[in-house]
Amino acid sequence: MRRAVAFLFILVVVALAGVAGAMFAITKPEIAASSDAANFGRKTLARGETLAALGGCGSCHTRDGGQPYAGGRAMETPFGVIYSSNITPHKENGIGAWSLAAFTRAMREGVSRSGAYLYPAFPYDHFSRVNDEDMEAIYAYFMQAVQPRPDKPPANAMAFPFNIRQGLAVWNALFLDPKTPTPPAGTDPDWARGAYIAEGLGHCGACHSPRNLLGAVDQSRAYAGAFVNGWYAPALDKSAPAPIPWTQKALVNYLMDGWDKHHGLAAGSMAPVSSALRDQPEDDVFALAAYIVSLTGQRSAQDQAAAEAKALALVDRTEWDAARDNAPPDAKVDAGQRLFQNRCAECHKKGGKPAPLALNTALNLPDPTNVVRATLEGIKPPRGALDRSMPAFGHQISQAETVAVVNFMRARFTERGPWSNVEDVVRRERQRK
């Protein structure tokens, strides 16, 4: 018995030694505190500002009501809550003591200056594709043009064993693959530039793609749509649910203005992205749009026109006509119809500032979350669409009324079947702080 216990003890010691050795082997060294940001010129700084906007850095690294790039925004993941870091040039709490080499390692390998592994909620699996010249410009911008802020974000709340950062070395070995798509023969020249932006700094697939059990983008279903931070990012592949297929021009409108007449208003996590792209070079945004539209599949002008005609015909059939659709006050009608009549019909009409609901992508998604959140929370417009918004009805209508109006809109303005989980989603979202 004693020999068995002794043997088991030895096995445990050997196993622990092996784990310790493996952990030590994958530990990254600290890079000494220093700064290389003393002599960058205006042109480099301006380029860095543009690239930071293309990367949407402020969207994640600025909490609601917080200072630009000072971090603290909570990001929900299946493994716990991650708070974005302070990336201002503050010496203690930001990246003011980071050299270009330390910054580049974080961007390409997901390892901080101290040697700690970063969680891939920071999309370094995309940023690893950024070239050296652009990397230097981004670094220069953050170190010289951004105001230092002392904010210290809260500690992450990650469940065991995901709070052990060394395990991310295995994640990197499995999923870190910095390759940019190769342009197909005969592709428009904008495609390559758009691919570089979307697959690199833009990290579009990080939000619009499902992830596997380990939290990596499922490359077999890239751009097939996914939940991100409580919103559903629509598919951008051939299954894209927009009633009128995206064109390059429509997507440029949406990306730069946060609005397109055939697609509606940017909301949720997309609104700050649109605001960030508002002042960026049109050439870059047109290139980005060219690449994204190519993911939805090539279609002829005839097919595009046919799809548009079909969608607009549905707009005409479902247009709210007060004389026909407004029920008398004492009439027994569907509760959703009654609420829509009293609260929604005046704005959601053809020719109104919101896009007709028959063209609304959110109503055509496989999940009602975006519609429910927009109904309860309203929509704060991006910078390019300040005259368009939606009020919040969360405290004005009951849970049952919310369920009824969401079901009514899905049935009235789409040709898709009913959602099966509206009640559950409404209950969940009404409890959201």
Image (cartoon, rainbow, N blue to C red):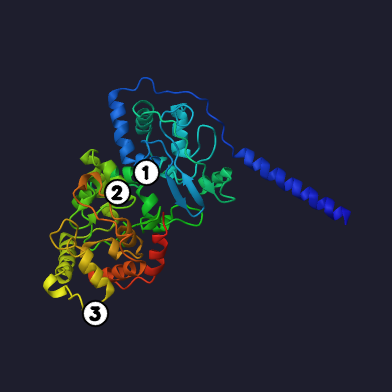
Q: Earlier in the sequence, mark 2 or mark 3?
A: 2
Residue 153 relative to residue 410: left or right: right
Q: According to the image, label 2 marks what residue?
A: 271
Q: Earlier in the sequence, mark 2 or mark 1?
A: 1
Picture quadrant where residue 358 is located: bottom left
Mark 2–mark 3 distance (CA, rounded to whole Å): 39 Å
Residue 1 relative to residue 27: left or right: right
One can see residue 262 in this view: yes
Q: According to the image, label 1 marks what residue?
A: 64
Mark 2–mark 1 distance (CA, rounded to whole Å): 13 Å
Q: Earlier in the sequence, mark 3 or mark 1?
A: 1
Residue 69 relative to residue 411: left or right: right
Q: According to the image, label 3 marks what residue?
A: 332
How far across and how far down the image is residue 409, in percent? 26, 68
Amino acid on which disc 2 is placed:
Ala
Disc number placed over residue 173 in the picture, else none: none
Q: Secondary structure at mark 3?
A: loop
Amino acid on which disc 3 is placed:
Lys
Q: Secondary structure at mark 1?
A: loop
Front position in the image: 52 or 283:
52
- The crowding category of the residue bearing disc 3, from other C-alpha atoms within 10 Å (few below 14, some 14 to 19, many at least 20), is few
Q: Residue furthest top?
A: 39
Residue 287 relative to residue 432: left or right: left
Front position in the image: 351 or 217:
351
How far across and how far down the image is residue 284, in percent? 25, 41
Up/down of 313 relative to 149, above or below: below
Q: Please report the residue visible at 62 percent of the width from the left and 38 percent of the height from the top.
A: 25
Q: Secondary structure at mark 2?
A: helix
Quarter of the image with the N terminus is bottom right
Front position in the image: 348 or 105:
348
Instruction: Please identify, in this view, whether the residue under mark 3 or under mark 1 is nearer the observer.
Output: 3
Front position in the image: 417 or 383:
383
